[in-house]
Image: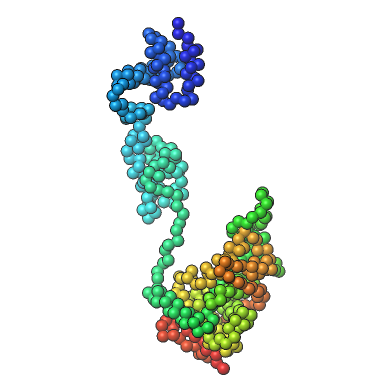
Amino acid sequence: MVNHKDIQRRFRSLSAFLDERMRRLVAAAESEAIGYGGISAVARATGVSRRAITEGMKELSRQKAARGTRSEPFRIRRKGAGRKRTIDRDPTLLADLDRLVDPATRGDPESPLRWTCKSVRILAEELQHEGHAVSYQTVAELLHALDYSLQANQKRLEGSQHADRDQQFEYINRKAQRYLRQGEPVISVDTKKKELVGDFKNGGREWQVQGEPEPVRVHDFEIREPGKGKVAPYGVYDLGRNVGWVSVGVDHDTAAFAVESIRRWWRWMGRPSYPSARRLLITADSGGSNGARVRLWKWELQQLADETGLEISVCHFPPGTSKWNKIEHRLFSFISQNWRGKPLISHEVIINLIAATTTTTGLAVKSKLDTNIYPAGIRVSDQQMVELHLQRDRFHGDWNYSLLPRS
């Protein structure tokens, strides 16, 4: 007499180790052991269908007949069995998905996802609207199969380039090398990004006790109180000595502020380091407070040349090439690293963080607060421009020029 409970107990004890094929083979072996009526009894006890048990018995018979011969590779199901893949049942699915995410659709204003974030869920919904039965998990798998992946924007497009860009780079390099060989100072100047003063979030992370991050304000609204507001750090980097100077201004970032920062660098760092200097070379961007077309920049440099007796030469980088300015990656980038994750709560904190910036190559930085007022909108007349002792270089005199002392 068949004991259904014994069959059920044996099958349950093995079920954790059985895949689809082994389930039907074990059930088939039980049925053969019982004999007549075994298929029905095992089907009731195990839940395996009669059809699966019958197929299992056929497999056992084939295996017995094939003993001593070369058997086929192990397969859970025979070739071609099982549920068909979605793309096999829906041949237009891949083409429709590729059409939705193809970068070419960016230029098609009629594309359904032209103005939408293309997440896998949104893509699945759009495909469902077009009549495809597909889940967002399947969409994710198909995107990988089509060689798509999640990618961020990459900065590669620089816009139009000036025809003489490379020649200007070579001109600046040759002139700077000549000055350095002769022991004359060469500096790179620029204004760093303006910073809010106060307990605001600063990018980056800093080591803190677990679960105790430093609290900062939720909104970055300027604090209009004494000692707060915004600051404009103007940097001067000495290429020959790997040292920097940063004037932290509290007023407008004007050409007068830029030249005053260079004046302070010369007074406290440049003149002691270059006591016999007769010339000074400045490399700067073409825009901003030290732009090539800014009249006030040239006027203020003339005043500095008259005060110091230095012949001040300027070489501007072509428009759109500010990242090649040495000060960006030899000074400003390290200042940003040094104060990452630290709220710039006061002028004193900003000065100390800048002055504490160092590198393994020996970078040293000094910084001072500049509380002077620099009104915006100051105009330099044509007559004042005529009074300048300005000499333009033969190559691109708009970018390369010198201001000689008038006394």
Residue 42, quarter of picture: top left
Residue drawn at x 40%, y 16% is: 29
Q: Nearer the viewer, residue 157 or 72?
A: 72
Which residue is situated farthest in the bottom direction here? 407
Which residue is situated farthest in the front direction here? 68
Residue drawn at x 33%, y 35% is: 88
Q: Position of residue 314 (x, y in %)?
A: 50, 81
Colour mapping:
rainbow
The answer to whether residue 51 is above or below residue 276 is above
Residue drawn at x 32%, y 38% is: 91
The answer to whether residue 139 is above or below residue 175 is above
Q: Position of residue 74 (x, y in %)?
A: 35, 29
Asked if one can make out residue 42 in the rendered structure from this viewpoint, the answer is yes
Residue 399, quarter of picture: bottom left
Residue drawn at x 41%, y 41% is: 141
Q: Position of residue 326 (x, y in %)?
A: 51, 72
